[in-house]
Amino acid sequence: MACNSLSSLPRACSDGSLGGVNKVYIIAYKDLATIVGANDVFSASTSGIVNAVGLASGKTYVEIGLLKDTSGLTEKLTKDNTKGTNFFTQTFSLVLGDITPTNTQFIQDVKGQPVSVIYKTRTNAYFILGLNGQFEITTIEGGTGVASADLIGHTCSFEGISSGTAQLLDPSIVASLIAA
């Protein structure tokens, strides 16, 4: 494969941007469906923006309630020139506030299977993870805490590998993917 030439990359011009995530939606990977003609659970435009995601009948991404400033994505490139391999490890974390039967059931449901995650950044961009079936929960840590200000709940970390960074999701299809 020939490598692309580099293009100039001007500095982004904005009035400011905010880090972090303000919406998260998750679905079990098994609830995605192959798109006819695409031979995959998604399709993307030539610019790489995901413009279709196949869902099994009656299935949608479900919203996960977030505590302020507790969710986000980190990505790390691993490259081995001696083997000719490179991939990104993507880690997405979220905090489930309180210990409730609903939160406990969510933990039980996600701990043994791959998932796909849609998240909306504070800059109103949508991204999608886990469309390759390799995104799973890796750690769950939590409890009641000790001091009055400690977290009562669980911090969940999902991790997967991908050949590229998190894919942008066409915002015009989000409403068709999430539970009403």
Image: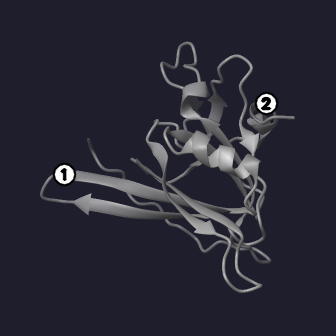
10, 41: nearer the viewer: 41
Looking at numbered disc 2 in the image, what kind of residue is underneath it?
A: Ser
Looking at numbered disc 1 in the image, what kind of residue is underneath it?
A: Gly
Quarter where residue 60 is shown: top right
The N terminus - image quarter? top left
Marks 1 and 2: which is nearer the front? 2
Residue at 50% across / 66% down in the picture? 8
Please provide percent x and percent y for residue 132. 46, 36
Is the Cβ of the residue at disc 1 closer than 8 Å to that at disc 2?
no
Q: Does residue 130 appear anywhere in the picture?
A: yes
The residue at which mark 2 appears reads as 176
The residue at which mark 1 appears reads as 84
Instruction: Kindly state the secondary structure of the residue where label 2 is placed.
Output: helix
The single residue placed furthest to the right in the displayed view is 180
Give whichever of discs 1 and 2 has the lower sequence position: 1
Q: Does residue 47 appear anywhere in the picture?
A: no
Residue at 77% across / 66% down in the picture? 67
Please provide percent x and percent y for residue 68. 78, 70
The single residue placed furthest to the top in the displayed view is 36
163, 117: nearer the viewer: 117
The C terminus - image quarter? top right
Left or right: 41 as drawn, with respect to 119:
left
Please provide percent x and percent y for residue 69. 73, 72
47 w.r.t. 82: above or below:
above
Please provide percent x and percent y for residue 128. 61, 45
87 w.r.t. 16: above or below:
above
